Amino acid sequence: MLIKIKRSWELPDSAATDEAFFRDRRRIAKGLAAGSILAAGFGAGLTGGSRAARAADDPTADLYPVPRDEGYQVDRALSDESDVTSYNNFYEFGSHKQIAEAAQALELRPWQIRIDGLVEEEKTLDIDALIRAMPLEERVYRHRCVEAWAMTVPWTGFPFAELVKRAKPLSKAKYIRMTSLADEATMPGIRAGWYPWPYTEALTMEEATNDLAFLATGLYGKPLPKQNGAPLREVLPWKYGFKSIKSIVRFTFTEERPVGFWEEIQKSEYGFWANVNPDVAHPRWSQASERLLSTGESVPTRLFNGYGEQVAHLYKGLETEFGDRLYR
Ligand code: MTE
């Protein structure tokens, strides 16, 4: 028998702030479902997100919205969709937050995902076939950027563990390196050239197969906008946001621990683990509090961004080896 125990980060029933509104919008959008274009356009109208409407040219748009998994809720209101889609970090398009317009140059199809390294058989997957084969669900997660701003987002996607299962890694594989698209023709940041492109990030196999590790294909009940990392990005709610790599084209299974994009640039500030911790300051600023997108409110940062119950065990015993390095 399944016994559901409420976990520390779940929303009390009485506090379902934006939920009724969100559900209602979804019901109406479903009712309209003469076509995904209509549904996406309706959502865009509500949030002023003309960029979201452009996501309607995604061939998987008919899959949205999908049911929310109520097991993943947080005790915070959702951030406004218009903020989440207009305040972004995507250095391939520029090193400032207003990259949404520039990111529209990202070409989403054809898009293939390469699975290689220590796997039974290396392969290339078509993104549409992959997304359609995956058990899509919606999860509301807190997101905490290393720069001390935070947001709360309803992501659509599938557990990272599902991809790992299909990749069939060899027992020697200990890490997974993810690689973002690096296209000089459409990404002005890449042409600028002083960063170690492509953007890469990595996780241990245990982290990637943890229940919280998620690969997102959408947000707010629609396909992912380009600026948020379409067509496939990682979402790791207990780690600083730079670990949640966007627009992924490759998953490589390795025995050696890979060095990520930011770690290569500045190891002392952006380490491999990057677990959220209010008590370990970034060398240039405190991490004790965070500013919420949309409200501007400043709230205390939580260890593992409030997800300690789900992930703290992954780091047991590593404190002696890595100390503060587990957190920055
Ligand atoms: N992925 C790529 N490829 N390029 C980036 O610049 N920025 C990271 C992460 N993933 C980044 C990336 C950082 S620092 C953060 S905080 C999040 O994306 C921001 O995601 P958002 O724009 O959807 O809020």
Image (cartoon, rainbow, N blue to C red):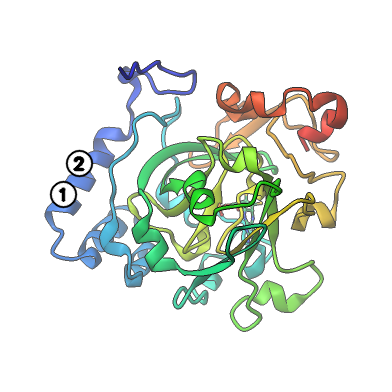
Locate ligand 1 by image quadrant: bottom right
The amino acid type found where label 1 is placed reads: Ile
| Residues marked 1 and 2 touching at CB (< 8 Å) | yes
Residue 117 horizontal/vertical position (percent): 67, 61
211 displayed left or right of 175: left
Q: Is the residue marked 1 within 8 Å of ligand 1, measured from its CB?
A: no
**Quarter assignment of residue 35:** bottom left
Numbered badge on residue 223: none
Residue highlighted by disc 1: 28
Label 1: few (<14), some (14–19) or many (≥20) C-alpha neighbours in 10 Å: few
Helix, strand or loop at label 1? It is helix
**Residue 234: in sight, yes or no?**
yes
Vertical placement of residue 194 versus 143, above or below:
below
Vertical placement of residue 126 versus 18, above or below:
below
Residue highlighted by disc 2: 24
Helix, strand or loop at label 2? It is helix
The amino acid type found where label 2 is placed reads: Asp
The residue sitting at 52% across, 40% down in the picture is 151
Residue 131 horizontal/vertical position (percent): 39, 60
Vertical placement of residue 261 versus 151, above or below:
below
The residue sitting at 69% across, 51% down in the picture is 202
Tell me how far mark 1 sits from mark 2, CA to CA: 6 Å
Residue 216 horizontal/vertical position (percent): 46, 52
Which residue is the extreme one toward the bottom? 185
Name the image quarter holding the N terminus. Answer: top left
Name the image quarter holding the C terminus. Answer: top right
The residue sitting at 30% across, 63% down in the picture is 61
Q: Is the residue marked 2 within 8 Å of ligand 1, measured from its CB?
A: no
The residue sitting at 34% across, 31% down in the picture is 70
Residue 195 horizontal/vertical position (percent): 79, 67
**Residue 51: in sight, yes or no?**
no
